Image (cartoon, rainbow, N blue to C red):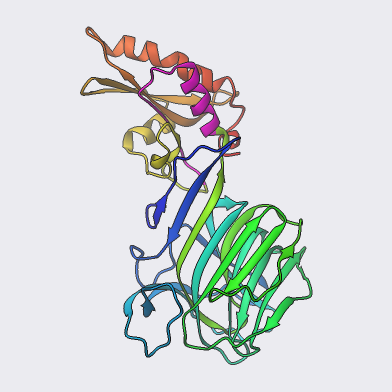
Amino acid sequence: MQFFSAALVALWLSGPAFAAELSLDFRECTLNEPPPSFRSTLTGEGKPGDWRIILDDAPLALPPLSPRTSNANKRPVLAQLARDGTDEHFPLLIYEEEVFGDFILTSRFKIVDGVAEQMAGIAFRIQDERNYYYIRASALGSTFSFFKIVNGTRSPPVGVKVEISKGVWHQLELDCKGNDIRALLDGREVLPPLSDKSFLSGKLGYWTKSDSVSYFADTHLSYIRKEIFAQTLVRDALKKYPRLLGLKIFAATNGQAKPQIIASSNLKEIGQPGRAAEQDVIAHSRIYQGKESDAVMVTLPLHDSNGETVAAVKVVMKAFPGQTEKNAIARAMPIVQLLEARVQSANDLTQ
């Protein structure tokens, strides 16, 4: 998530969830390469799309702008550039870092070209390539429609006839709460309110069809982030040990080679990369101890029920006169053992 402008808002709600915001603006991504934290795949036939970051005259203000508008700035946007004319060909670029339940999303899209089709859309509550919802706009068909795919079978559309100008940035807004789904195009609720209970949460992705060349920019989400079990462990440990100055859990997730903070007493730290010390703790079950001002920090391995090291835990405590490495570790050990007693496997941490 460090490649994007992301913030986890430390507003605790009732139950195991908290409010969060995520902005995918691609400004720090490498040009002519796909953005990190995404997976390119497809529904249907053919090859996955050619997703990469390019420069375009993307607008700065939220209202839709025509190409003649002066308020534009050449900056990085996401583009799907493949031109596979297969009819049942739906390229997807799925954001892999988060699962979204209830959310409000705004995103810009621009349909640039296409012979067989000229479409752009957002796929949401994605279970896999054969099960998800999507909202898409068609410049050729002049339609704005909602679809559901279940086990690879596409539902009839719920849509309206509306002009979708090619070569112009438009804004799509989605509001999903439980079974209820609302979709707006350029600030207007052109679709009727929708209700469906097939998928209550899932991943999010960009969607196109056939040979559509489409651009995307300024995707922003406000959502209720479900608390993973690792964060529950941190929260419960802080209740039992309220004098702790800090507590963090590091683990490698989503196939990543290096660990990152997956749970913390400071929610804003979640997603930050670990350092060599945390990587060494996980790889070799070593213990690290250090001091900073009036605090002492101990990083220990976290084991599952089979004794395998599945994470690193950093315990930050107030130092006292005569503090030694040995007694610092002795103070931190019961805290980690408290966590270990509730962890059966590595998968438990992110559930």
Question: Which quarter of the rendering shows the C terminus?
Answer: top right
Q: Residue at x 38, y 44 (%)?
A: 272
Which residue is at the far front? 188
Instruction: Please name whichever residue, 344 or 193, is drawn nearer the observer in this view of the structure.
Output: 193
Q: Residue at x 20, y 23 (%)?
A: 293
Q: Residue at x 33, y 62 (%)?
A: 28
Tell me: residue 173, above or below residue 345. below
Residue 307 in magenta stretch? no
- Quadrant in which residue 265 is drawn: top left
Q: Is residue 233 magenta?
A: yes
Task: Tell me: 163 left or right of 55.
Answer: right
Residue 33, placed above or below residue 250: below
Residue at 55% over, 38% down: 13
Magenta residues, start to end: 230-253
Q: Is residue 176 above or below residue 343?
A: below
**Where's residue 232, x and y in %?**
55, 30
Q: Quadrant of residue 115?
A: bottom right
Q: Is residue 67 above or below residue 201?
A: below
